[in-house]
Image: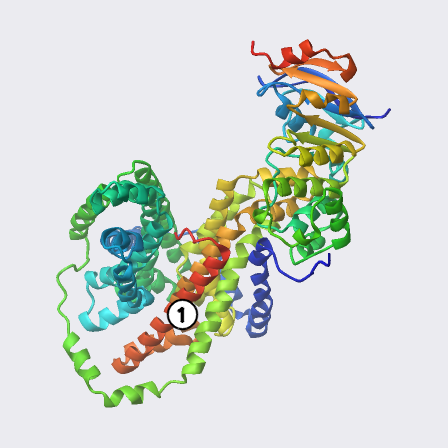
């Protein structure tokens, strides 16, 4: 399988110790670890929000710093705090996921009203959002609906690698299942979770403890004691 | 389910759309422009790099600056004290807590509205005609509208920040004053201090404008330099003013951090009074001839005649047109420049540009533009709009710095261009509060049309200055009433717009 993302001896201050990791196409990876173990740091290094103090990161064999904007859109993130544009409507937020494929004029037209309605309705349908919410301000939505808008935006971006930081926290079981199903539909994904019970949905499990990658295995090979150790306070 | 599609510009786009106004404004200016003034403008620009260092001139400018500073500081201190007292009296929360009803607050607000509706320049010229040239005339001209304006802002802040603890404390049966001091004052003190701090900057600019119109200080020196085309001399004064503004800003910032603004105002007032004794500034009690004005107004026959002297539709229409165009320019120029060069580093340069636009008093920038084009309403609007874009730009950059650039970085990670990232990121995030502030700024611009009326030879302000010069008191009275009516109408529209935005402007 093609290597999508490669981390070589990457470290960042005290937050992440020297970590090497490769995520391939068609690989679904779950990231486990206690709070403060370095999961968010690793996700943000993978999407380029943070720069490593040591080591290098490559996307499809190319250094991160040299990626064009068209290449950058191949990596999409569902942020823990969602990062919706609060002043915009649902459709405008969803379309903002497609900014990487269009020019400034398209971005301005999107702010004027409903643009590319069919494409938006398609992704809304995928995440079980009511079409009637299309023009609604995102500030008027419930927590679950906002989560789905963020997910629809990610679908509209059409990334090759989907990253997600604690996407299921504070969601009811039905919405959590839908969100996870959608994330797993991406060609490749790396998702940080606090749900060891869901690891069987993934092909690979990564475990972080105190900023160090201490576990990298297939889910069926992992014992309960290993999982407990990941969350145990030292 | 059928989905309705309609055009509804989003808030970040609403910050840019007023920029369309620039198209007709620039077209008219190109039509009316003439190349004859270009060498003069080049000389003016060169003057910035080669200010005059003539010792006599610098001494004269320094004296002028001191007079302007003393007028600004005294009027700021007095209006701050009065504004806080009147602000509390105009607060619905206070009266509801004390009396159980808010009607005295509404009464106070209505009584104060005419005082803030009239621009300090009008107050200045009015008092100048009645009491003659005197330091207190300039101070009173600023104190009267500023106190009323500050009272409105402080009352709004108190009512906006109504603490959820208020009913709880009231239920304890404590005295109303004690309840207010515990539940209300801590919540609003920071906003009030910020506003008071900002008013010093405004007072300095107002004192400068009064000087431009002959009430003394640095403004008078700048005007004389411009009229005699001594741009090097003019820039010496402008640089001196810029240094004074930066120093004042720093002093205020450090004082605000120490959280003792009440004591600071008292000390500064005392110092300013002592300082004034060393200057060529007459602060003796003015003796006036108000009686003669009242005698003229007592003759009712002149009232009707004065009223029909003017084509009110044309005069009010031109005032509103200048206000509309200037408001559009002031609102759109900062976000347009932001998107032209969107980066955290460019914000410093943009801050300098906005600082420069605020530095030059509007009447002087209007006169400078006059060397390039024939007098017209768009020219007046451009002068006014560019000056206020300096204020709006400062607000925009301050908001964006407080919000941070994280959203732009997030969008860039998704492949959006830098410009798109800033449009959907930082600009979108601050657009609501920015537009709320812009709506408040329209009120200020409406009042400020007075100072650029000379350029377009149009508008209520120009007529008012003309009527004042000829002691036509009944026409002055009618024009003041018209101004009050327009300003109050503007304030009502502004409040509605802010309610629609669900955001009260944090008025600076």
Horizontal and vertical percent for residue B406? Answer: 58, 37
Can residue B63 be spotted in the picture?
Answer: no
Camera-side residue: A65 or B360?
A65
Q: In the rendering, at what x and y percent does residue A49 appear?
A: 64, 31
Q: What residue is shown with label 1? A: B489
Q: Nearer the viewer, residue A200 or A159?
A: A200
Residue B508, given in percent of the width and then of the height, sits at: 39, 52
Question: Which of these two is toward me, B123 or B91?
Answer: B91
Compared across the picture, whether B171 is left or right of B392 comes to: left
Q: Is residue B244 left or right of residue B37?
A: left
Q: Secondary structure at mark 1?
A: helix
Residue B34: x, y in percent? 55, 72
Can residue B328 be seen here? The reply is: yes
Q: Left or right of A125: which side holds B197?
A: left
Q: Residue at x 31, y 86 (%)?
A: B306
Rendering quarter of residue A205 = top right
Residue positioned 30% across, 39% down in the render:
B255
- Please tell me in which quadrant of the rendered image residue A113 appears: bottom right
Residue in front for this viewpoint, B322 or B222: B322
Quadrant showing the N terminus of chain A: top right
Query: The numbered mark 1 sits on a residue in which chain?
Result: B
Rendered-image quadrant of the C terminus of chain A: top right
Mark 1 nearby-residue class (10 Å; few <14, some 14–19, many ≥20):
few
């Amino acid at each position: 399988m093609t290597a999508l993302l490669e981390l070589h001896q990457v470290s960042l201050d005290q937050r992440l110790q020297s970590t090497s990791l490769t995520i391939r196409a068609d690989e679904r990876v779950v990231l486990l670890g206690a709070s403060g173990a370095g999961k968010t740091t690793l996700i943000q290094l993978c999407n380029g929000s943070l720069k490593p103090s040591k080591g290098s990161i490559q996307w499809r064999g190319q250094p991160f710093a040299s990626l064009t904007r068209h290449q950058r859109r191949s990596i999409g993130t569902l942020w823990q705090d969602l990062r919706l544009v609060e002043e915009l409507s649902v459709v405008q937020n969803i379309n903002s996921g497609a900014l990487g494929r269009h020019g400034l004029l398209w971005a301005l037209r999107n702010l004027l009203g409903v643009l590319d309605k069919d494409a938006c309705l398609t992704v809304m349908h995928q995440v079980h959002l009511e079409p009637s919410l299309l023009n609604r301000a995102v500030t008027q939505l419930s927590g679950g609906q906002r989560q789905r808008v963020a997910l629809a935006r990610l679908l509209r971006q059409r990334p090759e690698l989907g990253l997600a930081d604690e996407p299921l926290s504070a969601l009811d079981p039905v919405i959590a299942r839908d969100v996870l199903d959608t994330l797993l539909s991406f060609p490749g994904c790396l998702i940080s979770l606090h749900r060891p019970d869901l690891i069987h949905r993934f092909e690979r499990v990564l475990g972080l403890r105190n900023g160090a990658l201490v576990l990298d295995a297939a889910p069926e090979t992992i014992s309960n004691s290993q999982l407990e150790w990941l969350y145990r306070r030292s | 389910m059928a989905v309705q599609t309609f055009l509804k510009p989003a808030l970040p786009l609403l910050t840019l759309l007023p920029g369309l106004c620039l198209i007709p404004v620039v077209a008219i200016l190109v039509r009316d422009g003439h190349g004859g003034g270009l060498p003069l403008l080049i000389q003016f620009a060169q003057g910035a790099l080669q200010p005059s260092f003539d010792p006599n001139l610098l001494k004269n400018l320094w004296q002028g600056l001191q007079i302007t500073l003393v007028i600004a500081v005294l009027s700021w201190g007095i209006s701050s004290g009065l504004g806080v007292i009147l602000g509390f009296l105009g607060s619905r929360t206070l009266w509801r807590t004390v009396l159980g009803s808010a009607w005295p607050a509404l009464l106070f607000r209505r009584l104060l509205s005419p005082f803030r509706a009239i621009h300090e320049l009008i107050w200045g010229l009015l008092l100048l005609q009645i009491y003659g040239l005197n330091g207190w005339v300039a101070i009173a001209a600023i104190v009267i509208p500023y106190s009323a304006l500050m009272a409105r802002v402080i009352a709004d802040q108190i009512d906006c920040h109504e603490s959820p603890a208020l009913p709880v404390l009231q239920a304890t049966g404590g005295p109303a004053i004690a309840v207010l001091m515990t539940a209300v004052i801590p919540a609003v003190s920071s906003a009030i201090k910020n506003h008071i701090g900002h008013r010093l900057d405004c007072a300095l600019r107002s004192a400068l404008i009064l000087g431009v119109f002959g009430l003394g200080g640095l403004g008078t020196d700048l005007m004389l330099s411009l009229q005699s085309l001594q741009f090097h001399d003019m820039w010496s004064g402008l640089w001196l003013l810029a240094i004074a503004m930066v120093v004042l800003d720093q002093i205020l910032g450090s004082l605000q951090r120490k959280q003792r603004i009440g004591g600071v105002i008292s000390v500064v007032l005392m110092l300013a009074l002592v300082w004034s004794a060393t200057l060529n500034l007459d602060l003796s009690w003015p003796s006036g001839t108000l009686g003669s004005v009242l005698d003229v107004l007592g003759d009712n026959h002149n009232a009707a005649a004065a009223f029909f002297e003017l084509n009110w539709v044309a005069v009010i229409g031109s005032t509103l047109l200048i206000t509309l165009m200037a408001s559009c320019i002031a609102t759109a120029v900062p976000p347009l420049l932001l998107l032209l060069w969107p980066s955290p580093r460019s914000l410093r340069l943009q801050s300098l540009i906005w600082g420069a636009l605020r530095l030059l008093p509007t009447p002087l920038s209007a006169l400078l533009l006059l060397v390039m084009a024939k007098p017209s309403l768009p020219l007046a609007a451009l002068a006014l709009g560019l000056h206020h874009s300096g204020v709006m730009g400062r607000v925009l950059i301050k908001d964006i710095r407080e919000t941070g650039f994280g959203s732009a970085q997030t969008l860039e990670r998704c492949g959006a261009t830098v410009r798109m990232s800033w449009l959907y990121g930082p600009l979108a995030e601050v657009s609501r509060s920015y537009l709320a502030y812009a709506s408040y700024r329209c009120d200020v611009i409406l009042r400020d049309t007075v100072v650029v009326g000379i350029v377009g030879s149009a508008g209520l302000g120009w007529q008012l200055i003309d009527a004042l010069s000829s002691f036509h008191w009944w026409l002055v009275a009618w024009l003041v009433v018209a101004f009050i009516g327009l300003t109050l109408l503007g304030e009502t529209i502004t409040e509605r717009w802010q309610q629609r935005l669900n955001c009260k402007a944090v008025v600076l």
